[in-house]
Amino acid sequence: MTTTPPQTEQQLMQLVYAIAGMNIAQVAQQCEQIVPENLMHNKGFVGQLIEMALGAESGSLAQPDFPHLGIELKTLPINAQGRPKESTYVSVAPLTDLGGIHYENSIVGQKLNHVLWIPIEGEQSIPLAERRIGQGFLWKPSEHQYQQLHRDFTEIMETIALGQVETISAHQGEVLQLRPKAANAKALTQAIGPEGRKMMTLPRGFYLRPSFTASLLDHFIR
DNA sequence: GCATGATCATTT
DNA sequence: AAATGATCATGC
C-alpha cells in the first residue's frame, strides 16, 4: 500500500495516531517493505519506513519532509529509560559561500521551525522488527529554545567563516553541535581555511544533543 | 560529492 | 555510561 501525502496537519496526525503502538514489522508489512535483521548496513531504514508510512514526499531534497505543511519529520530512538539514545541529525553545514546566512533563513532554522517527532524503541536488545512506534507529536521551538538554537548556530557559523572549522569540536554548542557527516574519512569537501584560503575538510552536519530532545519528550509526556 | 535517512564504535 | 568522532545505504 502507498500512503497519499497528507494535505493538512490533521490528516498527517491521523496517520501518526494510526501507527502509534504498532511495531516495525507491522508498519513494514503495511508499506510492503522487508525488515532487515539489524541496522548495521541500513542505518536509515526506520526513518525511511516512517516517511513512507506517513506519506512524506521530499526524498533527498533539502527541504521539510512535508513541504506543503512546512513540517520536518524526525524519528527519535528511545532507550529503556525512555530517553533519546542518539543525537538527532538536522542538516549539512555550509562551509563556504556563507554570505547572508542567518539562523532565520538557514536550512537548520527552516527545518527546526516545525518538527513532527516520532519516538521509537531503539534498544539493540529488542529485535528490529519488534520495536514499537510511540505517539508522535508536533513541536515548535519556544522562545527560549529558539534563542539557544540561534546562539549555537551563530557561534558555529562565525567560527566556520573565520576559517576555523577544524577547531570546532562536538563539545561546542549548548543544544546544537557540529559533527562529521560523511560516508567515510576520504569524503572531503571545500571549506574556508586558516588564511582565508580554500581547503578540503570532512563534511560537517548539525546535530541536536540528546539532552535537548529529552526535554522535548518530557514536555509532551502524557 | 551532496543531500537524504541515521547508528556504530571508540574515547572519555 | 555517555558523548564524540566515524561510518553505512541510497539517489542523482
Image (tube, coloured by chain):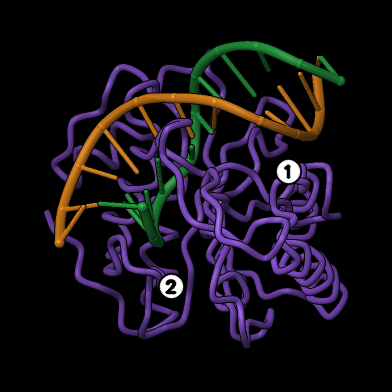
Chain colours: A purple, B green, C orange
Chain ID at mark 1: A
Q: CA distance from mark 1 to mark 2?
A: 21 Å
Residue A47 visible, this angle: yes
Disc 2 marks a residue whose amino acid type is Pro
Looking at the picture, tell me which residue is in the foreground, A150 or A112: A150
Q: Are marks 1 and 2 in contact (CB under 8 Å)?
A: no
- Quadrant where the C terminus of chain A sits is bottom right
- Quadrant where the N terminus of chain A sits is bottom left
Disc 1 marks a residue whose amino acid type is Pro
- Please name the residue that numbered disc 1 is placed on: A210
Query: Residue placed at 33% from the left, 30% from the top?
Result: A42
Secondary structure under tag 1 reads helix
**In the figure, A106 relative to A181: above or below?**
below
Query: Residue placed at 19% from the left, 38% from the top?
Result: A29
How many numbered markers are drawn? 2
**In the figure, A64 relative to A136: above or below?**
below
- Please name the residue that numbered disc 2 is placed on: A64
Q: Quadrant of residue A23?
A: top left
Relative placement, left or right, of A204 versus A85 is left
Chain ID at mark 2: A
Residue A216 point in image, percent of width and height: 74, 57
Secondary structure under tag 2 reads loop
Residue A33 point in image, percent of width and height: 17, 38
Relative placement, left or right, of A82 versus A108 is right
Q: Quadrant of residue A97?
A: bottom right
Query: Residue placed at 51% from the left, 55% from the top?
Result: A74
Q: Residues within 10 Å of mark 1 (few under 14, many from 20)?
A: some
Query: Residue placed at 84% from the left, 76% from the top?
Result: A147
**In the figure, A42 relative to A200: above or below?**
above
Residue A221 visible, this angle: no
Q: Earlier in the sequence, mark 1 or mark 2?
A: 2
Label placed on residue A47: none
